[in-house]
Image (cartoon, rainbow, N blue to C red):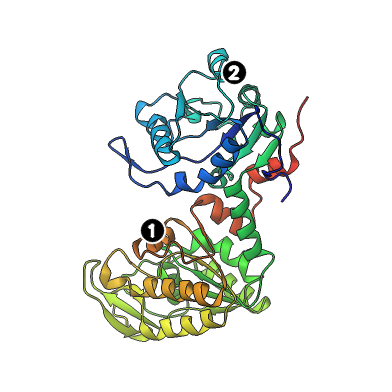
Amino acid sequence: MKNHLSKNLDLKGKKVLLRLDLNVPMENGAITETSRIEKIIPTIKLLSEKQAKIIILSHIGRPKGKVVKEMSLKPISEKLSLLLKKEVLFNNSPLNGDAKFEIDKINDGSITMLENIRFNKEEESNDKKFAKKISDLGDIYVNDAFSCSHRSHASIDAITKYIPSYFGLQISQEISALEKITNKIEKPVSLVIGGSKISTKFKIINNLIKKFDNAIIVGGMANTILKHTGKNVGKSICERDSGDLVKQIFENSKKYDCEIIIPNDVIVSKSLDGTGKEKDINDVMDDEMILDIGSKTILTIEKIINKSKTVLWNGPAGYFENPNFQNGTKKILELISSRTEHENIFSVAGGGETVAAINKFEKSNSFTFISTAGGAFLEYLEGKTLPGIKAINQNVRVK
């Protein structure tokens, strides 16, 4: 990849502005989940070993350009210090002469974290003057925040016009994995996609149908398709005004020879806290909700995954938060992870609920790549060009 962080770069004594996404979940001032922090440690270690002066830029929450004490990055700097077993200095000076004066004094190989970049209202407006002010703090800029790269923000986009810019190790892995699963595909390739609304993932399905052999649609999205193909879905989550979207999906699947697979049996209940009963898709009653896929559907999915060399998974098969409706999601997870481990297929998983399911069933090491990027992951799959990626690939600096 062009402009990627290389071990051959001479960074000794260079001030490296490292943009990270440290927007981790917190409760009562304590960090409750650290996977985003852990994933960027290799980039930090590489820069530190090369004796760069590391200045971390990041954010947490949406303070809307105001200083919000509860959204300070200080707890993040302390957690990162523990994980690295190395001091991480915290600099809460405004991004003016004070911050620059303190940064100019730091030692080679040291790490400094600046306060929440979103405390500055100019960040989210992609303000060029603000971006120039940030760039003046460093010699080199590194973006290792793929999950923020769909945002046209000053520390993601505009900054690259004023400073030599590179991709970090984590973002390079993310782009490489998504590029391989969308453009450099080893066939047969299958999409397993779920979640509640087909309208939010319609563009993803239509983009990938052009390249994939199979699209397995489950969860609430499948309910919408079932409804618009004449099936009774009872009280299930369903977008009843999405008939045109469903029609277009089937038209495109025929055009590009991609098979659409939807459930032919399901697990139903009259409430979310019920026990569940397996039924043929034609036997769902008006007072029932579809909350998982059935055993016949799982067997169909198993046959497809067993023939696939590449699999992309985004979205659960049902209401997996209740153990009575987790079997479909768990089985899909086990099928993909087993094929990855034993047959070396290329597998990518992403999306908040998908990652939550992977963590719940302790399969985080069983995929080729797991994306925690959320919105950026989904927009990339839609075929969009992400501003943060485009900015570094172009990296034409203003003099």
Mark toward the start of the polypeptide (1 vs 2): 2
Total numbered labels: 2
Q: Residue at x 41, y 65 (%)?
A: 363
Q: Which mark is residue 104?
A: 2
User: Where residue 295 appears, x then y in whole percent?
Assistant: 36, 84
Q: Can you identify the residue that label 1 sits on?
A: 356
Residue type pointed to by label 2: Asp
Please determine whether, in this image, residue 340 is positioned above or below residue 153: below
Q: Which mark is residue 173?
A: none
Please determine whether, in this image, residue 149 is positioned above or below residue 180: above
SS at badge 2: loop
Mark 1 Cα shell of 10 Å, populated few (<14), some (14-19), many (≥20): some
- In this view of the protein, which residue sits in the foreground, 171 or 102? 102
Q: Is residue 266 visible?
A: yes
Q: Is residue 217 visible?
A: no
Residue type pointed to by label 1: Ala
User: Where residue 181 appears, x then y in whole percent?
Assistant: 62, 65
Locate residue 143 relative to residue 330 in the image: left or right: right
Name which quarter of the figure residue 239 lies in.
bottom left
